[in-house]
Image (cartoon, grey):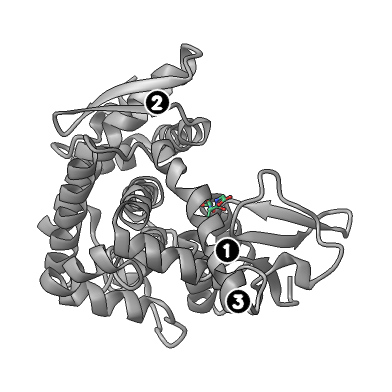
Amino acid sequence: MNAPLLLSGAPGSPYTRKMVALLRYRRIAYRWLLSAQAVPGLPQAKPPLLPTFYLLGLDGALQAVTDSTPLIRRFDSEFEGRAVIPADPALALIDALLEDFGDEWLTKAMFHYRWTYAADIRKAGEVLACWRGGPHDDAALAATAQAVRDRQIPRLRFVGSNLQTGPVIEAGYRRVLLALEDHFRVHRFLMGARPGASDFALYGQLTQLVHFDPTPMALAAEIAPRVVAWVLMMEDLSGLEPGEADWLDVGRLPDSLRALLRESGRLYAPLLMANAQALQAGQSEFQALIDGQPWVQQAFPYQGKCLAWLKRDHAALSPADRARADAALAGSGNELLFSP
Ligand SMILES: N[C@@H](CCC(=O)N[C@@H](CS)C(=O)NCC(=O)O)C(=O)O
Protein backbone atom coordinates (compact mmCIF):
# COMPACT_ATOMS: atom_id res chain seq x y z
CA MET A 1 0.00 0.00 0.00
CA ASN A 2 2.76 2.44 -0.91
CA ALA A 3 0.99 4.23 -3.75
CA PRO A 4 -1.20 7.15 -2.68
CA LEU A 5 -4.65 5.92 -1.64
CA LEU A 6 -7.34 6.86 -4.10
CA LEU A 7 -10.68 8.13 -2.84
CA SER A 8 -13.63 10.08 -4.15
CA GLY A 9 -15.57 12.46 -1.94
CA ALA A 10 -16.85 15.99 -1.54
CA PRO A 11 -15.98 18.92 0.73
CA GLY A 12 -19.62 19.08 1.90
CA SER A 13 -19.58 15.44 2.99
CA PRO A 14 -18.73 15.11 6.70
CA TYR A 15 -17.47 11.54 6.28
CA THR A 16 -15.15 12.61 3.48
CA ARG A 17 -13.74 15.32 5.73
CA LYS A 18 -13.39 12.81 8.57
CA MET A 19 -11.28 10.53 6.39
CA VAL A 20 -9.16 13.17 4.66
CA ALA A 21 -8.20 14.67 8.04
CA LEU A 22 -7.42 11.14 9.25
CA LEU A 23 -5.14 10.47 6.26
CA ARG A 24 -3.30 13.75 6.86
CA TYR A 25 -2.78 12.97 10.53
CA ARG A 26 -1.68 9.42 9.72
CA ARG A 27 0.67 10.79 7.04
CA ILE A 28 -0.85 8.41 4.51
CA ALA A 29 -0.45 9.78 0.98
CA TYR A 30 -3.73 10.11 -0.90
CA ARG A 31 -5.38 11.34 -4.07
CA TRP A 32 -8.79 12.87 -3.47
CA LEU A 33 -11.03 12.85 -6.55
CA LEU A 34 -13.91 15.31 -6.47
CA SER A 35 -15.63 13.17 -9.06
CA ALA A 36 -15.13 9.45 -9.52
CA GLN A 37 -15.62 10.07 -13.23
CA ALA A 38 -12.23 11.79 -13.28
CA VAL A 39 -10.62 8.34 -13.47
CA PRO A 40 -12.36 6.12 -16.01
CA GLY A 41 -13.11 2.53 -15.14
CA LEU A 42 -13.29 2.86 -11.36
CA PRO A 43 -15.64 0.36 -9.72
CA GLN A 44 -18.90 1.67 -8.16
CA ALA A 45 -19.56 1.19 -4.47
CA LYS A 46 -22.89 -0.37 -3.51
CA PRO A 47 -24.55 1.62 -2.07
CA PRO A 48 -22.64 4.55 -3.57
CA LEU A 49 -21.53 6.52 -0.49
CA LEU A 50 -19.06 9.33 0.02
CA PRO A 51 -16.25 8.87 0.57
CA THR A 52 -15.48 5.82 -1.55
CA PHE A 53 -11.97 4.39 -1.36
CA TYR A 54 -10.51 2.41 -4.26
CA LEU A 55 -8.28 -0.18 -2.64
CA LEU A 56 -6.32 -3.03 -4.16
CA GLY A 57 -8.01 -6.36 -3.54
CA LEU A 58 -6.19 -9.68 -3.13
CA ASP A 59 -6.71 -10.30 -6.86
CA GLY A 60 -4.82 -7.09 -7.69
CA ALA A 61 -7.96 -5.32 -8.93
CA LEU A 62 -9.27 -2.08 -7.41
CA GLN A 63 -12.26 -2.50 -5.13
CA ALA A 64 -14.68 0.26 -4.14
CA VAL A 65 -14.79 0.32 -0.33
CA THR A 66 -16.97 2.58 1.82
CA ASP A 67 -17.65 3.13 5.50
CA SER A 68 -15.25 5.22 7.51
CA THR A 69 -15.51 3.26 10.77
CA PRO A 70 -14.11 -0.11 9.57
CA LEU A 71 -11.75 1.73 7.17
CA ILE A 72 -10.15 3.59 10.08
CA ARG A 73 -9.51 0.24 11.79
CA ARG A 74 -8.13 -1.28 8.58
CA PHE A 75 -5.73 1.65 8.11
CA ASP A 76 -4.67 1.42 11.76
CA SER A 77 -3.58 -2.18 11.18
CA GLU A 78 -2.09 -1.69 7.70
CA PHE A 79 -0.11 1.52 8.26
CA GLU A 80 2.44 1.79 11.08
CA GLY A 81 2.44 4.41 13.79
CA ARG A 82 0.24 7.38 14.70
CA ALA A 83 -2.68 5.03 15.47
CA VAL A 84 -6.06 6.55 16.26
CA ILE A 85 -7.49 3.59 18.15
CA PRO A 86 -6.39 4.06 21.78
CA ALA A 87 -3.90 1.47 22.99
CA ASP A 88 -5.96 0.75 26.12
CA PRO A 89 -8.90 -1.45 24.99
CA ALA A 90 -11.17 0.08 27.64
CA LEU A 91 -10.50 3.59 26.34
CA ALA A 92 -10.87 2.27 22.78
CA LEU A 93 -14.46 1.28 23.60
CA ILE A 94 -15.23 4.80 24.87
CA ASP A 95 -13.62 6.18 21.71
CA ALA A 96 -15.69 3.87 19.48
CA LEU A 97 -18.90 4.87 21.25
CA LEU A 98 -18.18 8.57 20.74
CA GLU A 99 -17.13 7.96 17.15
CA ASP A 100 -20.51 6.37 16.52
CA PHE A 101 -22.30 9.20 18.33
CA GLY A 102 -20.56 11.69 16.03
CA ASP A 103 -21.18 9.70 12.87
CA GLU A 104 -24.76 8.71 13.53
CA TRP A 105 -26.27 11.28 15.88
CA LEU A 106 -24.47 14.52 15.16
CA THR A 107 -25.12 13.95 11.49
CA LYS A 108 -28.81 14.37 12.30
CA ALA A 109 -28.05 17.89 13.52
CA MET A 110 -26.01 18.55 10.38
CA PHE A 111 -28.77 17.38 8.07
CA HIS A 112 -31.51 19.03 10.13
CA TYR A 113 -30.02 22.53 10.15
CA ARG A 114 -28.89 22.36 6.54
CA TRP A 115 -32.26 21.44 5.10
CA THR A 116 -34.61 23.21 7.55
CA TYR A 117 -33.70 26.90 7.61
CA ALA A 118 -34.04 29.18 4.58
CA ALA A 119 -30.51 30.64 4.71
CA ASP A 120 -28.97 27.20 5.17
CA ILE A 121 -31.05 25.64 2.38
CA ARG A 122 -30.11 28.45 0.06
CA LYS A 123 -26.39 28.23 0.72
CA ALA A 124 -26.13 24.44 0.73
CA GLY A 125 -28.15 24.14 -2.47
CA GLU A 126 -25.88 26.48 -4.37
CA VAL A 127 -22.52 25.51 -2.94
CA LEU A 128 -23.11 21.76 -3.05
CA ALA A 129 -24.24 22.21 -6.65
CA CYS A 130 -20.86 23.79 -7.51
CA TRP A 131 -19.15 20.56 -6.45
CA ARG A 132 -21.29 18.54 -8.84
CA GLY A 133 -19.98 18.48 -12.39
CA GLY A 134 -19.32 22.09 -13.35
CA PRO A 135 -18.25 24.70 -14.17
CA HIS A 136 -21.83 25.97 -14.44
CA ASP A 137 -23.26 29.13 -15.93
CA ASP A 138 -25.80 30.91 -13.70
CA ALA A 139 -28.86 29.17 -15.13
CA ALA A 140 -27.27 25.73 -14.88
CA LEU A 141 -26.13 26.43 -11.30
CA ALA A 142 -29.64 27.54 -10.28
CA ALA A 143 -31.13 24.39 -11.81
CA THR A 144 -28.58 22.06 -10.16
CA ALA A 145 -29.01 23.86 -6.81
CA GLN A 146 -32.76 23.31 -6.99
CA ALA A 147 -32.27 19.65 -7.92
CA VAL A 148 -29.99 19.19 -4.88
CA ARG A 149 -32.58 20.81 -2.58
CA ASP A 150 -35.44 18.78 -4.07
CA ARG A 151 -33.47 15.61 -3.44
CA GLN A 152 -32.28 16.38 0.10
CA ILE A 153 -35.17 18.17 1.81
CA PRO A 154 -37.57 15.19 1.64
CA ARG A 155 -34.78 13.06 3.12
CA LEU A 156 -35.08 14.95 6.44
CA ARG A 157 -37.52 12.26 7.50
CA PHE A 158 -34.82 9.58 7.13
CA VAL A 159 -32.84 11.23 9.93
CA GLY A 160 -35.96 11.76 12.03
CA SER A 161 -36.02 15.57 11.77
CA ASN A 162 -39.46 17.17 11.89
CA LEU A 163 -41.29 19.96 13.74
CA GLN A 164 -41.53 17.87 16.89
CA THR A 165 -37.96 16.55 17.00
CA GLY A 166 -36.23 19.71 15.73
CA PRO A 167 -36.03 21.30 19.20
CA VAL A 168 -34.57 18.06 20.66
CA ILE A 169 -31.91 17.96 17.93
CA GLU A 170 -31.04 21.64 18.39
CA ALA A 171 -30.90 21.51 22.19
CA GLY A 172 -28.60 18.48 21.85
CA TYR A 173 -26.30 20.32 19.44
CA ARG A 174 -26.05 23.25 21.87
CA ARG A 175 -25.17 20.95 24.79
CA VAL A 176 -22.59 19.10 22.68
CA LEU A 177 -20.95 22.42 21.79
CA LEU A 178 -20.85 23.42 25.47
CA ALA A 179 -19.40 20.05 26.55
CA LEU A 180 -16.71 20.32 23.86
CA GLU A 181 -15.96 23.94 24.78
CA ASP A 182 -15.50 22.83 28.37
CA HIS A 183 -13.28 19.93 27.30
CA PHE A 184 -11.02 22.10 25.15
CA ARG A 185 -10.37 24.40 28.08
CA VAL A 186 -8.02 21.68 29.33
CA HIS A 187 -7.49 19.08 26.60
CA ARG A 188 -6.49 19.34 22.97
CA PHE A 189 -8.50 16.35 21.76
CA LEU A 190 -11.40 14.22 22.96
CA MET A 191 -8.98 11.40 23.69
CA GLY A 192 -6.38 13.57 25.45
CA ALA A 193 -3.23 15.07 23.95
CA ARG A 194 -3.63 12.96 20.78
CA PRO A 195 -6.70 12.35 18.65
CA GLY A 196 -8.73 9.14 18.59
CA ALA A 197 -11.21 7.93 15.96
CA SER A 198 -13.92 9.87 17.82
CA ASP A 199 -12.05 13.13 17.27
CA PHE A 200 -12.17 12.59 13.51
CA ALA A 201 -15.85 11.60 13.57
CA LEU A 202 -16.96 14.69 15.48
CA TYR A 203 -14.62 16.83 13.40
CA GLY A 204 -16.25 15.59 10.19
CA GLN A 205 -19.75 16.63 11.22
CA LEU A 206 -18.51 19.88 12.76
CA THR A 207 -16.75 20.95 9.54
CA GLN A 208 -20.29 21.50 8.31
CA LEU A 209 -22.10 22.58 11.48
CA VAL A 210 -19.45 24.99 12.71
CA HIS A 211 -17.91 26.18 9.44
CA PHE A 212 -20.47 25.88 6.68
CA ASP A 213 -24.19 25.99 7.51
CA PRO A 214 -25.08 29.51 8.69
CA THR A 215 -27.53 28.71 11.52
CA PRO A 216 -25.44 26.22 13.55
CA MET A 217 -22.29 28.17 12.60
CA ALA A 218 -23.64 31.35 14.23
CA LEU A 219 -24.47 29.46 17.42
CA ALA A 220 -20.96 27.97 17.58
CA ALA A 221 -19.35 31.38 17.06
CA GLU A 222 -21.45 32.74 19.89
CA ILE A 223 -20.97 30.06 22.54
CA ALA A 224 -18.00 27.88 21.55
CA PRO A 225 -14.93 29.74 20.22
CA ARG A 226 -12.60 26.91 21.23
CA VAL A 227 -14.66 24.48 19.16
CA VAL A 228 -14.53 26.83 16.18
CA ALA A 229 -10.73 26.86 16.49
CA TRP A 230 -10.45 23.12 17.14
CA VAL A 231 -12.25 22.18 13.94
CA LEU A 232 -9.81 24.22 11.84
CA MET A 233 -6.86 22.69 13.68
CA MET A 234 -8.13 19.14 13.23
CA GLU A 235 -8.10 19.56 9.47
CA ASP A 236 -4.33 19.06 9.28
CA LEU A 237 -2.55 17.37 12.19
CA SER A 238 0.39 16.23 10.07
CA GLY A 239 2.78 18.10 12.36
CA LEU A 240 1.61 16.57 15.64
CA GLU A 241 4.04 14.11 17.27
CA PRO A 242 1.86 11.85 19.44
CA GLY A 243 3.26 9.73 22.27
CA GLU A 244 1.87 6.71 24.10
CA ALA A 245 1.42 8.76 27.29
CA ASP A 246 -0.85 11.20 25.47
CA TRP A 247 -4.05 9.15 25.78
CA LEU A 248 -6.55 9.93 28.54
CA ASP A 249 -6.63 7.61 31.52
CA VAL A 250 -9.96 5.78 31.32
CA GLY A 251 -9.98 5.55 35.10
CA ARG A 252 -10.01 9.33 35.39
CA LEU A 253 -12.09 10.64 32.51
CA PRO A 254 -12.61 14.41 32.73
CA ASP A 255 -16.12 15.64 33.58
CA SER A 256 -16.31 17.29 30.15
CA LEU A 257 -15.92 13.93 28.40
CA ARG A 258 -18.44 12.39 30.77
CA ALA A 259 -20.84 15.17 29.78
CA LEU A 260 -20.39 14.17 26.14
CA LEU A 261 -20.95 10.51 26.99
CA ARG A 262 -24.15 11.54 28.77
CA GLU A 263 -25.33 13.22 25.58
CA SER A 264 -24.75 10.00 23.69
CA GLY A 265 -26.62 8.11 26.42
CA ARG A 266 -29.45 10.61 26.44
CA LEU A 267 -29.97 11.08 22.72
CA TYR A 268 -28.41 8.22 20.81
CA ALA A 269 -28.53 5.09 23.02
CA PRO A 270 -32.37 4.93 23.21
CA LEU A 271 -32.55 5.37 19.47
CA LEU A 272 -30.06 2.56 18.83
CA MET A 273 -32.08 0.25 21.08
CA ALA A 274 -35.46 1.09 19.53
CA ASN A 275 -34.00 0.74 16.04
CA ALA A 276 -32.51 -2.68 16.85
CA GLN A 277 -35.79 -3.92 18.31
CA ALA A 278 -37.71 -2.82 15.22
CA LEU A 279 -35.18 -4.51 12.93
CA GLN A 280 -35.41 -7.70 14.94
CA ALA A 281 -39.21 -7.65 14.75
CA GLY A 282 -39.06 -7.01 11.01
CA GLN A 283 -40.75 -3.60 11.40
CA SER A 284 -39.94 -0.89 8.92
CA GLU A 285 -40.37 1.92 11.43
CA PHE A 286 -39.48 2.47 15.09
CA GLN A 287 -40.82 4.72 17.81
CA ALA A 288 -38.76 5.93 20.72
CA LEU A 289 -38.87 8.51 23.44
CA ILE A 290 -35.82 10.73 23.03
CA ASP A 291 -35.31 13.37 25.67
CA GLY A 292 -38.98 13.04 26.57
CA GLN A 293 -40.22 13.60 23.02
CA PRO A 294 -41.75 10.98 20.74
CA TRP A 295 -39.44 10.08 17.90
CA VAL A 296 -40.66 8.15 14.87
CA GLN A 297 -38.23 7.09 12.19
CA GLN A 298 -37.72 4.52 9.51
CA ALA A 299 -35.65 1.63 10.88
CA PHE A 300 -32.07 1.83 9.69
CA PRO A 301 -30.19 -1.49 9.17
CA TYR A 302 -26.80 0.27 9.21
CA GLN A 303 -27.38 1.51 12.76
CA GLY A 304 -28.31 -2.04 13.72
CA LYS A 305 -24.81 -2.94 12.55
CA CYS A 306 -23.30 -0.07 14.58
CA LEU A 307 -24.89 -1.44 17.75
CA ALA A 308 -23.70 -4.95 16.94
CA TRP A 309 -20.12 -3.67 16.48
CA LEU A 310 -20.19 -1.87 19.83
CA LYS A 311 -21.60 -4.93 21.58
CA ARG A 312 -18.97 -7.13 19.94
CA ASP A 313 -16.15 -4.81 21.08
CA HIS A 314 -17.56 -4.68 24.60
CA ALA A 315 -17.91 -8.48 24.75
CA ALA A 316 -14.35 -8.95 23.44
CA LEU A 317 -12.82 -7.01 26.36
CA SER A 318 -11.08 -8.97 29.09
CA PRO A 319 -13.08 -8.99 32.35
CA ALA A 320 -10.69 -6.42 33.88
CA ASP A 321 -10.85 -4.11 30.86
CA ARG A 322 -14.63 -4.47 30.69
CA ALA A 323 -14.92 -3.50 34.35
CA ARG A 324 -12.87 -0.35 33.68
CA ALA A 325 -14.93 0.55 30.59
CA ASP A 326 -18.19 -0.08 32.48
CA ALA A 327 -17.01 2.10 35.37
CA ALA A 328 -16.25 4.91 32.90
CA LEU A 329 -19.72 4.58 31.38
CA ALA A 330 -21.61 4.25 34.68
CA GLY A 331 -24.40 6.79 34.92
CA SER A 332 -24.01 7.95 31.30
CA GLY A 333 -27.11 6.22 29.95
CA ASN A 334 -25.04 4.04 27.62
CA GLU A 335 -25.11 1.01 29.92
CA LEU A 336 -28.29 -0.29 28.30
CA LEU A 337 -26.39 -0.86 25.05
CA PHE A 338 -24.33 -3.56 26.72
CA SER A 339 -26.88 -5.22 28.98
CA PRO A 340 -27.40 -8.83 27.91
N1 LIG B 1 -21.25 5.13 7.35
C1 LIG B 1 -20.73 5.83 6.20
C2 LIG B 1 -21.63 6.99 5.86
C3 LIG B 1 -21.26 7.70 4.57
C4 LIG B 1 -22.39 8.58 4.08
O1 LIG B 1 -23.54 8.47 4.52
N2 LIG B 1 -22.07 9.49 3.16
C5 LIG B 1 -23.09 10.39 2.61
C6 LIG B 1 -22.50 11.72 2.24
S1 LIG B 1 -21.85 12.56 3.65
C7 LIG B 1 -23.63 9.79 1.33
O2 LIG B 1 -22.87 9.38 0.50
N3 LIG B 1 -24.96 9.74 1.22
C8 LIG B 1 -25.62 9.17 0.09
C9 LIG B 1 -26.08 10.17 -0.89
O3 LIG B 1 -25.97 11.37 -0.63
O4 LIG B 1 -26.57 9.73 -1.92
C10 LIG B 1 -19.31 6.28 6.52
O5 LIG B 1 -18.95 6.35 7.71
O6 LIG B 1 -18.52 6.50 5.60
- Residue 150 percent across, percent down from the top left: 50, 50
Element carrying mark 2: helix
Single out the residue that lies furthest toward the top.
281
Q: Is residue 300 left or right of residue 34?
A: left
Give the residue number, with chain letter if any, for mark 2: 275
- Residue that appears at 27% across and 64% down: 190
Q: What separation in Å lies between label 3 and label 1 (alpha carbons)?
A: 38 Å
> Mark 2 is on which residue type?
Asn
Disc 1 residue type? Ala
Quarter occupied by residue 51: bottom right
> Farthest front residue?
139
| Image position, residue 254 (x, y; %) | 14, 59
Mark 1 or 2: in front is 1
Residue 335 is situated, as x and y percent measured from the top left of the image, at 24, 31
Residue at the location (51% across, 36% down)? 302
Between marks 2 and 3 in the image, the one whose residue lies nearer the viewer: 2
Whether label 3 touches label 1, CB < 8 Å: no
Q: Which circle's residue, 3 or 1, is located before the other in the chain?
A: 3
Separation of residues labelled 1 and 2 (CA atoms): 37 Å
Q: Is residue 300 left or right of residue 187?
A: right
Residue 269, placed above or below residue 8: above
- Tell me if residue 199 can be seen: no
Q: Quadrant of the C terminus?
A: top left
Please, what is the three-letter code of the amino acid marked with disc 3? Ile
User: Residue tagged by mark 1?
Assistant: 143
Crowding at dot 3, Cα within 10 Å, few <14 / some 14-19 / many 20+, comes out as: some
